[in-house]
Image (cartoon, helix red, strand yellow):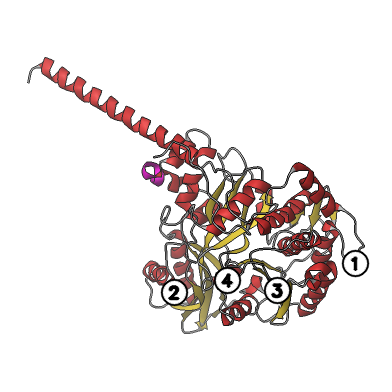
Amino acid sequence: MSRSRWRCAGGALLWLSLVGLGVLVSALLIRTYTLQERRRAGPWQGEGVRGAELGELERGQLIEALRGEMQRGERGHLREALRGAIRIPTVSFSEEEQNTTALAEFGEYIRKVFPGVFSSSLIQHEVVAGYSHLFTVRGSDPSLLPYMLLAHSDVVPATSEGWDVPPFSAEEHNGYIYGRGTLDDKSCVIGILQALEFLLKRSYKPRRSFYVGIGHDEEVSGHKGAMKIVAKLQSQGVALAFVLDEGLAVLDRVIQGVRRPIALVGTTEKGSITLKLTVNRAPGHSSMPPPETSIGILAAAVSRLEQNPMPNMFGAGPEGAMFEQLAGEFVFPLNVMMANLWLFSPLISRILELKSSSNAIVRTTTALTLFNAGIKSNVIPPSASATVDFRLHPAQTVQEVLDIVRNTIRDDRVELAVLKAFNPLPVSPYDEGNFGYQVLQRTIHAVFSDAPVAPGVCIGNTDSRHFVNLTNSIYRFTPVVLKPEDMSRIHGLNERIAQEDFERLVQFYYQLIQNSDADKVPTSHRTAHEL
């Protein structure tokens, strides 16, 4: 071929490449900005919604009433109601050891603080398993499927070491209430009951029946509390429209590259495996050690588990939909990448692996939590054991993870024993046709300044996992704003909640209860921009 023909062919290929690149860029940008338009919600529609959207005057009256002083010790105003609850050390140490005296005191406390809830003819209250509470709020329309609000009264242990204030003092500083349970989860317990108390004072009568469940052992499995509540409801043939429990929150600057606070609703939870690894070898004197001891064999095994993490599963669960739906909230060029995961998913998944907080979203995590071996410095130990905690990605099963563990260790001398395990929870629907998710989304928009809402994955576990046989719509959302410095406070030091955030939390439940009176799914009007 002549040189001129080569130049022509090369020019044609360059032209075609530029055209192809232009088409690709155009497609990426079109998808980015049309996807953003599609996420804009329209006005609320649905029969039976009364007082769902508060006017400025009524909103102000609500806040003033919540802030108003009442007789302390009998009713308490909003802040004192929470502080009194925090002062009761309802600690769960293990499934076998709980502070039952404090749990009983907590039951008496909520009776005193919320007399309207306990005396209303609309509400039936039952104590379940000694310390959990079930409230049945009867609606006027039996044709509407009921829903359930969940929270729990127990907390994890806390000592004063490392805290700025005693963890059960409920001290106030600079607009914050400090104490174990301010975020997990007494704020929701008091918030739900306070919202209900306030509605009853306004002579509110719901159309849709609902339940309020307060478990007493969520921090140690929920087997005695939430599971007993579920058994009671199942015996009555109850089916639920949706369940709302604690979980994800409104995140402010927690996700890098996002322009404003965003609300994540947990639509599933990771599964869990607690696995014990044991090596048994003949004991002996340290002066004549064998080539490998039980400690050495076990150390090599757990090292292999740490050095070979579980596979990256990004996109196989709801985390892909989370980033796609939030694409318009990211700065450029992240907005283009998030809106086009079909192309950029491998790159995004690798970036997410770099931080432990986001790495937990994309894979099953492996955490070595206990290691026990040795009896004396000059004795070869007969055995060594380790406990490993796995949190399973929604796209993996217990059996799949155990198979990977065995293939990674590849040592028959290491015995594996499953102490407890359960698969990830089913992914609850988050489409425009789901009543529960849409009610949550509209309530979040109203209370949190139109914050964008997206589905997410709870990396921890809640009592809601016990309710899978009562509904396929289980959501996990704590109506508070969390900033980066707040994330380590949950189960950590100096747990706290801003007084303003707690008032907003009560307002959230106040509006959610009324919004749930709609008799059909709230619909939105899409724009003309469609993919």
Q: Which residue lies under the disc numbered 4?
A: 370
Residue at label 3? Answer: 92
Q: What secondary structure is marked by label 2?
A: loop
Q: Amino acid at mark 4?
A: Leu
Magenta residues?
342-346
Residue 194, x across and y down, in percent:
77, 61
Three-letter amino acid code at the position of disc 3: Ser
Question: Which element is circle 3 on?
Answer: loop
Pick whichever of labels 3 and 2 is earlier in the sequence.
3
**Which residue is farthest right?**
71
Badge 2 or badge 1: first in the primary sequence: 1
Residue at 59% from the left image edge and 80% from the top image edge: 236
Image depth: mark 2 or mark 1 in front = 1
Query: Based on the displayed image, in which of its 4 quarters is residue 459 positioned?
Result: bottom right
Label 3 crowd (10 A; few <14 / some 14-19 / many >=20)? many
Distance between the alpha carbons at the discs numbered 2 and 4: 21 Å
**Position of 310 relative to 354 (above/below):** below
**Label 1 amino acid?**
Gly
Judge left or right: residue 518 versus residue 422.
Answer: right
- Residue tagged by mark 2? 292
Q: Position of residue 238 (x, y in %)?
A: 57, 75
Q: Amino acid under label 2?
A: Glu
Residue at image x 69%, y 59%?
492
Which element type, helix, strand or loop, lies under badge 1?
loop
Q: Are dots 3 and 1 in contact, CB under 8 Å?
A: no
Q: Does 343 lie within the magenta span?
A: yes
On screen, residue 291 above or below 485:
below
Name the mark nearer the viewer: 3 or 1: 1
Q: Image point 41% across, 32% down: which residue?
A: 29
